[in-house]
Image: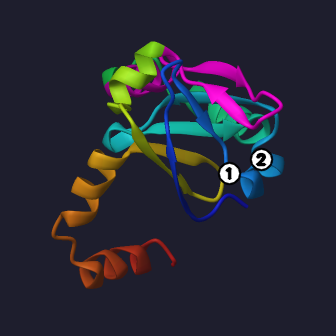
């Protein structure tokens, strides 16, 4: 399971280090794409395949489904981890995620989120009423 918060830097070649405790779960080859909230999603191949199946089930006749599919699939690329545990982030995703120097990887069970430090800090500073969120999650069975 991919969990935890890990701080890193992105080097001048757009490579980030994957935390050693997450490497086995993520695998040496995995998929990355645009994520919500201006982060980058990194999926182990088995989880990406499940996600792709869900996307394929969306009807192309619905404009919102087409937009949703385009968002994730047009930015998707398979990447390989090197022997030092680094992965090259493509320039389009570096730009989308505003990855400049310091980055944060967040484990989200089935995927990693890669955030710029600045965007992650801004997200955490938002006024979020966790009591209201918890009530909505109860409606979903959590």
- Residue shown at 84% from the left, 49% from the top: 24
Color theme of the render: rainbow
Whether the magenta-drawn stretch holds residue 71 is answered as yes
Q: Quadrant of residue 136?
A: bottom left
Q: Nearer the viewer, residue 7 or 77?
A: 7
Per the rendering, the mark at residue 23 is 2
Q: Is residue 38 magenta?
A: no
Badge 1 local density, few (<14 within 10 Å), some, or many (20+)? some
Q: From the viewer's perspective, is 126 left or right of 138?
A: left
Position of the N terminus by quadrant:
bottom right
Q: Nearer the viewer, mark 2 or mark 1?
A: 1
Q: Which residue is mark 1?
A: 19
Q: Is residue 10 above or below residue 126?
A: above
Helix, strand or loop under label 1? loop
Which residue of the protein is positioned furthest toward the left in this rendering?
127
Mark 2 crowd level (few <14, some 14–19, many ≥20, 10 Å Cα): some
Residue 114 lies, in percent from the top left, at 49, 42
Identify the image quadrant of residue 109: bottom right
Q: Residue at x 68, y 51 (%)?
A: 19
CB contact under 8 Å: marks 2 and 1: yes
Residue at (73% x, 53% y) in the render: 22
Residue projecting furthest to the front: 12
Secondary element under disc 2, as helix, strand or loop, is: helix
Point out residue 128 in the picture as x, y percentages from the top left corner. Answer: 21, 71
Which residues, given as a range, are shown in magenta? 64-90
Q: Position of residue 138 (x, y in %)?
A: 42, 80
């Amino acid at each position: 399971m991919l969990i935890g918060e890990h701080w890193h830097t992105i080097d001048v070649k757009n490579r980030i280090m994957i935390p050693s405790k997450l490497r086995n779960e993520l695998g040496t080859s995995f998929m990355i794409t645009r994520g919500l909230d201006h982060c980058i999603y990194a999926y182990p191949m088995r989880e990406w395949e499940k996600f792709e199946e869900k996307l394929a089930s969306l009807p192309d006749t619905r404009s919102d489904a087409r937009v949703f599919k385009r968002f994730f699939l047009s930015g998707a690329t398979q990447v390989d981890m090197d022997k030092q545990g680094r992965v090259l982030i493509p320039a389009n995703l570096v730009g989308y995620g505003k990855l400049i120097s310091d980055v944060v990887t967040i484990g989200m069970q089935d995927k990693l989120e890669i955030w710029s430090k600045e965007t992650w800090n801004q997200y955490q500073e938002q006024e979020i009423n966790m009591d209201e969120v918890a009530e909505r999650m109860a409606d979903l069975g959590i």
